[in-house]
Structure formats: C-alpha cells, structure tokens
Image: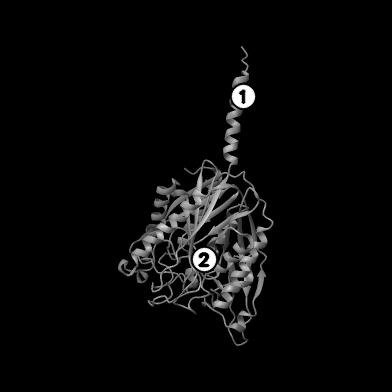
Amino acid sequence: MRRCATPTLVLAVLVLLLSHVAARAALTGGCAKVNITPPLGLKLIGSKGQPSDAVLDELFAKALVLSDGTTTLALVSIDLLYTPLEEITNPVRALVKEKTGIAERNVMICASHTHSGPEVFTNWKLDPEDHVDESEIDQAYLKTLIREMAGAVELAHRNRRDVRIGAALGELPEVIYNRRPRRADGKVQMAFTLPAEVAATHCVQTSLDGSTRVTFTFPEDTPPLTFGPIDPDVFALRVEDAGGEILASLVSFGCHPVCVYPFQSTAVSADYPAHATRVVEQAEGGISLFALGLAGNIVPRQRDVGPCAQIGRALGGEAVRRLQFVTTTDKVALASGRRTVTLPTKNGSPESITTEIQVLRLGEIYLLGLPGEVLVEVGLAIKSRADLETLFVTTMTNDSIGYVCHRRAYDEGAYEPGAGTNLAPGAGEIIIEQALALLDEVKQGRVK
C-alpha cells in the first residue's frame, strides 16, 4: 500500500533542514590582541646573555576565533621565537579550553620567530648544546605570557559577530633569498648576509618547473654560486563583518625575521612583521595577525633597522593590495586535524622526539601548521603534491624542533642540517608524508 507524507511531517522535515542550513550559514568570528612586551632587563634570544635595554616595537599575542555553529577554531599569532609544545602551546590550549570550551585540538599557535624577543625556552628538543636550564628562565614572565595568550583567545571568543571570510595570494620575491647557495662541488657555502653591492644586483628568476629563485652577480674573481628556491607567496586572509568592514586579517610570508638582530641585539622588536601588520591595520582597520611561511633557509636581502621597515611596509602593502579584491563568504564549514609525529635524532639521546602537525580548514582554505624551522624545499614539496588550490603552510607552529631539512641538505652540509638541528636524515621526508596524509584526512572529512 502506498503511503503519503502528511503535511505536518513534510513541514517538520523542512524546518529541520532549514535550521541545519541556518546553523551552518551563521559564521561568527572575533579577534583580539594583548601586549606581551617583556620588562626591560629580561634577556633576549640574540642578546648573548645581556639584559634588554630598549623597545623598538611592542610584542603582541593576537587571536582569531571562528565558529560555524558546530566547530570553533582559534588561531594565535605570537611575537616569540618559538612556542614549544609542552612548555607553551599545550598549557595555552588547556587554559583556552577552561575559559572558552574550545577543544584543545582546535587551537593553533604560530610564533612569528622574531630573534629580538624574550628567551623563555629550555630548547630540550634541539641539539643538547642548545639546552637551557629552567633556572635561567624568568618563570614569572612565562606564566604571565601563557595567561595573556589564553586571554587573547577568550576576548576574541567573547567578541564574536557574524562574519564573512576569503583569501587571496600575492607575492614579494624581491626582498628575500635562499641563504644556502651551492658551490661547483655541490656543497653549500652559507650566505647569511650579502655585501651591499652584491645584494643590489638581485634578479628574480622563474624556472621552467615554476620554481622561483633570487640570484646575484658576484665579482669576477669569486667562484660561482647557485642559489636555491624561495617561496614568494604572500597569503592574505580577510575576515569582515556583515557590513563589509574588515574585522581581522592574517598575513603569511616566508622570511626569517632577522632584520634587527644582531644589529641592535639588546632591543626588543617584533622585526619586519610588526611593520607589515601595522600597515594593514592602518590601511584597512581591524587586527592583523602574522604567521611565518617557509622561512627555514630564507632571509632578508638587506638587514638593519631601515631595511626592516622597508620589508615590512612592502609586505604590508602587498597584503593590502590583495585584500581589496577578496571574494568573501559566510557559507563556510570549519574543521581541524592533528597528527602526532615521531622523528629520528642524530645524537641518539633520545633516539627520537615527538611533535605534531596540524591543519585548520576554513571552507576551501587550508592552513597547514608545521613545527620547527622548515626548509623551503620541504614545504614546496608539500604544496606541489597536495592538490589544493588554497593551501597555506605556516612554520614555527605549535612546537620547536630545530631545522627540518630534506635529505639532500645533509649531503650539501653547512649550518641547518649540521649545528642547526638534532634531527636525522629522513625527518623532512616524514614531515612531508605525514602532512600530506593529514591534509587528505581533513579534506575527506575523516578526522575524528
């Protein structure tokens, strides 16, 4: 016998469906920032034990919270060199959950990697020679720092309103270069800085494979050097309110924040990201966050306080340019995924370290957070294989594990695979495969 749905039943089903759609459509977001500038006298990363005696830029913890009615995500940008998983990231996550209810797995913390910030890390996952005793760390400041970071998330969560989001991609290759050029014998000759007359000869080249390199002209009596790839991408995320006014932005770029260090080694500074985010905030309004891109072996073409402001303003200007034409939407489903990763060490004590990678999905926008100082070759391998139109890779995210190198780097030698890391050959390839697997899980909706 054929059965017909009653009008009451049909209406109930429609109401249920419409309420589900409405819940998904109600994307909300909030943003906040708190000042974490350390008191003068606190030792800085690059001060070689000397107390800080000046403040060039104040340091901030900035938080962006987004919720689709089902999932709530929090992204924290912090003006620190690192955010070690056990010492900073996990304590902040626990406090955020206590204050807001946001699941710990949904909180991502990105360190700007400024080399002119406070030294508050034991570095126990790095080379044993880099370890710092807890007694040398200002524990009072560290506890305050953790509370302030969690407080920024709490404020952002409390101030949520209806928002729309969208992302755009720009580029800024002319201000950076790969500091690991190879000699004719295939070995790397580190080029942390370049003479001014050489830096002025920079040339941006795009290879047939699509990779971008910045090359230089050296004096004729200098042995030739082959410069490696860079990632020129500038990522700009726009979060606007219902009226189209910008509430928050996120800028990501791959370049070591080492303009101020070591020229003013005892001065507190957020380096070029401070200038970049200030430009965006002054031009667009709202709060602008910064996340470090593929910067492991990428440095500024010029350094010192003047070039710091120039690079920052150029980056901020490129972000502002791209933010003008972003198509935004509130039809966004949010998701996150985390994966624990075990990596082998060189010294064998311990034999391995455990860290994590994380993905935040904002609709069709993917933010992949990688721990440590990831060499550009590792990150570019992920981007080329991920098959995602809008993928942005952040580094120095959630943990500090030293330099993450591809296998070839160990054969080439020099700083990053040598004194710069305690990770054994193969660690970079593990990160690549695990990141791709996690991205696929999040894309397919298979994360728990």
Q: Residue at x 58, y 76 (%)?
A: 307
Say which of marks 1 and 2 sits in front. Answer: 1
The answer for how far apart the CA atoms under marks 1 and 2 are is 57 Å
Residue farthest to the bottom, as pictured: 221
Where disc 2 sits, the SS reads: loop
State the residue in front, 396 or 379. 396
Where disc 1 sits, the SS reads: helix
- From this view, report whether residue 371 is shown above or below residue 260: above
The three-letter code of the residue at mark 2 reads: Leu
Q: Residue at x 63, y 67 (%)?
A: 172
Residue 302 shows in this picture: no
Q: Position of residue 438 (x, y in %)?
A: 50, 50
State the residue in front, 222 or 114. 114
Residue 422 shows in this picture: yes
Q: Position of residue 344 (x, y in %)?
A: 40, 60
Image label count: 2
Q: Which residue is mark 1?
A: 11
Q: Which residue is mark 2?
A: 375
For the residue carrying disc 1, how many other residues have a C-alpha within 10 Å: few (<14), some (14-19), or many (20+)?
few
Residue farthest to the top, as pictured: 1
The three-letter code of the residue at mark 1 reads: Leu
Mark found first going from the N terminus, 1 or 2 = 1
State the residue in front, 133 or 347. 133
Q: Residue at x 42, y 57 (%)?
A: 89
